[in-house]
Image (spheres, helix red, strand yellow):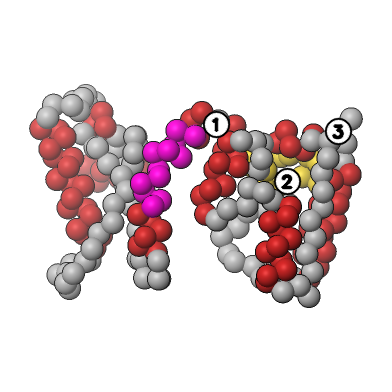
Amino acid sequence: MPDHLHGILFVKEQLGCHLGQVIKGFKTGCNKAYREMGLSVTSTVVPSAATGSQQRKQEKRDRSLDDREHGQLWALGFNDHILSGRGELANWKRYLQDNPRRLAIKRAHPDYFRVRFDLQVALHTYAAIGNRFLLHYPQKIQVQLSRSLSEEQIKEKVEDYLAFSKPGHQYYEACTEGKLLLLAPWPHQNERIALTRQMCLDLNSMTKEICEWKQK
């Protein structure tokens, strides 16, 4: 990708060190080769009155030096995920192969993929991503499913309402065609919270409110 690298590592034997050390060594080698190619810009050293230890602390805090102009091809850190579940490897292969296409879609329709945190609709404020013009569509229908329905009945109802309902990143097609808008009524947080009955009732109320809302 233009600004990052995806890869799948197959570890076939016990490593003598932590995987993070292996990645660090790979990145260090790339940085060295990058500098040897003469693509980095030599930085100017400005004398400082600070002591050696103080200067080292200052340089450590100054992450602006960690860029390509100063011989650092890679950003600090990396993100990894162990593929252990059934089908995960195949899913990630498809994801990586499709990555360039998704990037092209994002660049062609940047507003559809930009999160907005202050979207006011009727009495509530939402975080939103997708085609916000759908809120002005003249015909909106509230979809409300009961827990008494079987999985098959729920699937049939969802398919009746959402002709574009597809798994995974197929939502990108819906988004680029202007068919998708995601609204989050509660502040984002990393902890997983169990959905309560009251939260479901609140969501039903908000959905009804959105369907009846008309912008003045």
Decide: few, some or many residues near mark 3? Use Cα within 10 Å; few <14, some 14-19, many ≥20.
Answer: few
Q: In the displayed structure, would residue 189 be above or below residue 171?
A: below
Q: Is residue 37 left or right of residue 124?
A: left
Q: Which residues are magenta?
A: 94-105
The answer to whether 104 is drawn above or below residue 185 in the figure is above
Camera-nearest residue between 48 and 143: 143
The relative height of residue 107 versus residue 211 in the rendered view (above or below) is above
Helix, strand or loop under label 1 = helix
Q: Residue at x 86, y 33 (%)?
A: 215
List the residue tagged with mark 2.
Answer: 126
Residue at 70 percent of width and 47 percent of height: 183
Query: Residues under labels 1 and 2: Cα distance?
Result: 19 Å
Discs 1, 3 touching: Cβ within 8 Å: no
> How crowded is the residue under tag 2: few (<14 C-alpha within 10 Å), some, or many (20+)?
some
Badge 3 or badge 2: first in the primary sequence:
2
- Report how far apart the C-alphas of labels 1 and 3 lie in the structure: 24 Å
Amino acid type, residue under disc 1 in the picture: Pro
Amino acid type, mark 3: Gln
Q: Main secondary structure of the magenta part?
A: helix
Q: Which residue is mark 1?
A: 110
The quarter of the image holding the C terminus is: top right
Q: Earlier in the sequence, mark 1 or mark 2?
A: 1
Q: Residue 186, how many percent across, how many down?
A: 71, 54
Give me the residue at 13% from left, 39% from top. 32
Magenta-span inclusion, residue 134: no
Q: Which amino acid does the dot numbered 2 rest on?
A: Tyr
Name which of mark 1 and mark 3 comes first in the sequence: 1
Give me the residue at 36% from left, 60% from top.
90
User: Which residue is the extreme one toward the left?
Assistant: 36
Which disc, if any, is residue 215?
Answer: 3
